[in-house]
Image: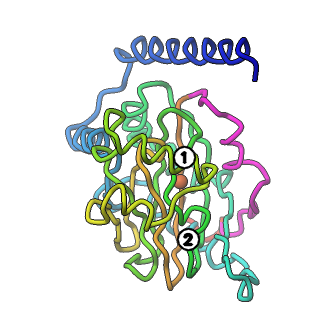
């Protein structure tokens, strides 16, 4: 890239960051008010980069229908024929269009919490129903990485089966260990860059941030994890047994990289039809 192009690109980036800061500032007085319990959730999320709760604690009305729909879709998922492959990819269904999933995702209380975190009007992109399988080596989202759809992202992971060590819980590094003002931030970025942004393995990360600082999130079925996957380094730990979960995705509207968000609603992954409408309570 010529020097002129590099300068042009830098100026474009600076302008875009500046208008982002202005938009945050302009939207601040318009942020929806939160109940005390949701303010606690938000404070924790801002401090740590993640917050673990449960469907029971959240107490949203649409959770019953969500769980029914999820279990119905899980029972319809075909068993993938990957017994001979050494890297067993996750099986993903895009269930964004199905009303039980979108109703839960668009619960006003959730949207208000997320808008307060993101600081701008929110876009809900979609939801993946996902089965993750046993693997012996780290690859894909089993490697430590950060997501890049936007400057701030909220993903909500909802476990549909009990997730203990053998089912490979979600794991992250709390925000304070990778602050932009710390050397670790740059050491991690260098390692991610070296990996072609694919991710880094446990041994590499352990040399920068010791394993004792990593936060694993095991939990019963119904565990709900809010996480800014742009801010915190994260991965799914290696598992010996299957994990079933829902992944809900939110960014600012519009996000910085809209092209990375289409996978949550388009045909990248299978899109099952609604097959359970007669069994769902209205
Ligand atoms: Fe991720």
Query: From this viewpoint, which residue is outermost toward the front?
Result: 3
- In the rendered structure, the answer to whether residue 211 lies left or right of residue 275 reads left
Question: Looking at the image, is mark 1 or mark 2 nearer the viewer?
Answer: 2
Can you tell me whether the CB of the residue at mark 1 lies under 8 Å from the nearest atom of ligand 1? yes
Q: Main secondary structure of the magenta part?
A: loop
In the rendered image, the quadrant that contains the C terminus is bottom right
Out of 135 and 77, give the one closest to the viewer: 135
Magenta residues span 253-276
**Residue 127 appears at what percent x and percent y?**
59, 53
Q: Secondary structure at mark 2?
A: loop
Q: Are marks 1 and 2 in contact (CB under 8 Å)?
A: no
- Residue placed at 36% from the left, 26% from the top? 32
Q: Quadrant of residue 81?
A: bottom right
Residue 261 is inside the magenta segment:
yes
Q: Where is residue 147 shown, x and y percent of the image?
A: 54, 46
**As rendered, which of 231 and 50 lies closer to the eye?**
231
Say which residue appears at 29% left-offset and 47% top-offset: 177
Q: Residue furthest bottom?
A: 84
Image position, residue 223 (x, y; %): 37, 65
The residue beneath circle 2 is 138
Asked whether residue 85 is drawn in magenta, I would say no
Local SS, label 1: loop
Q: Is residue 76 left or right of residue 131?
A: right
Quadrant in which the N terminus is drawn: top right
Distance in Å between CA atoms under marks 1 and 2: 17 Å
The residue positioned 57% from the left and 76% from the top of the image is 137
Residue under pointer 1: 147
Eyeballing the image, is 81 above or below 201? below
How crowded pointer 2 is (Cα within 10 Å; few <14, some 14-19, many 20+) is rated as some
| In the foreground, 100 or 279 | 100
């Amino acid at each position: 890239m010529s020097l002129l192009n590099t300068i042009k690109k830098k100026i474009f980036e600076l302008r875009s960051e500046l208008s982002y800061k202005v938009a945050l500032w302009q939207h601040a007085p318009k942020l929806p008010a939160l109940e005390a319990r949701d303010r606690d959730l938000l404070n924790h999320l801002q401090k740590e980069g993640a917050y673990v709760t449960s469907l029971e604690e959240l107490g949203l009305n649409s959770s019953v229908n969500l769980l029914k729909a999820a279990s119905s879709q899980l029972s319809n998922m075909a068993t993938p024929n990957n017994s001979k492959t050494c890297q067993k990819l996750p099986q993903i269904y895009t269930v964004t269009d199905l009303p039980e999933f979108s109703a839960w995702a668009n619960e006003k209380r959730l949207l208000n919490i997320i808008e307060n975190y993101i600081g701008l009007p929110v876009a809900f992109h979609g939801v993946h129903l996902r089965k993750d399988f046993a693997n012996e080596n780290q690859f894909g989202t089993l490697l430590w990485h950060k997501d890049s759809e936007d400057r701030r992202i909220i993903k909500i992971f909802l476990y549909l089966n009990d997730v203990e060590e053998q089912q490979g819980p979600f794991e992250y590094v709390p925000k304070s260990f990778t602050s932009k003002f710390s050397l670790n931030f740059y050491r991690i970025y260098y390692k991610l860059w070296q990996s072609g942004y694919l991710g880094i393995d446990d041994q590499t990360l352990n040399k920068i941030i010791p394993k004792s600082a990593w936060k694993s999130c095991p939990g019963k079925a119904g565990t709900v994890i809010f996480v800014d996957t742009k801010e915190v380094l994260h991965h799914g730990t290696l598992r010996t047994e299957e994990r079933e979960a829902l992944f809900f995705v939110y960014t600012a509207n519009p996000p910085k990289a809209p092209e990375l968000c289409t996978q949550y609603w388009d045909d990248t992954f299978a899109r099952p039809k609604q097959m359970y409408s007669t069994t769902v309570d209205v």
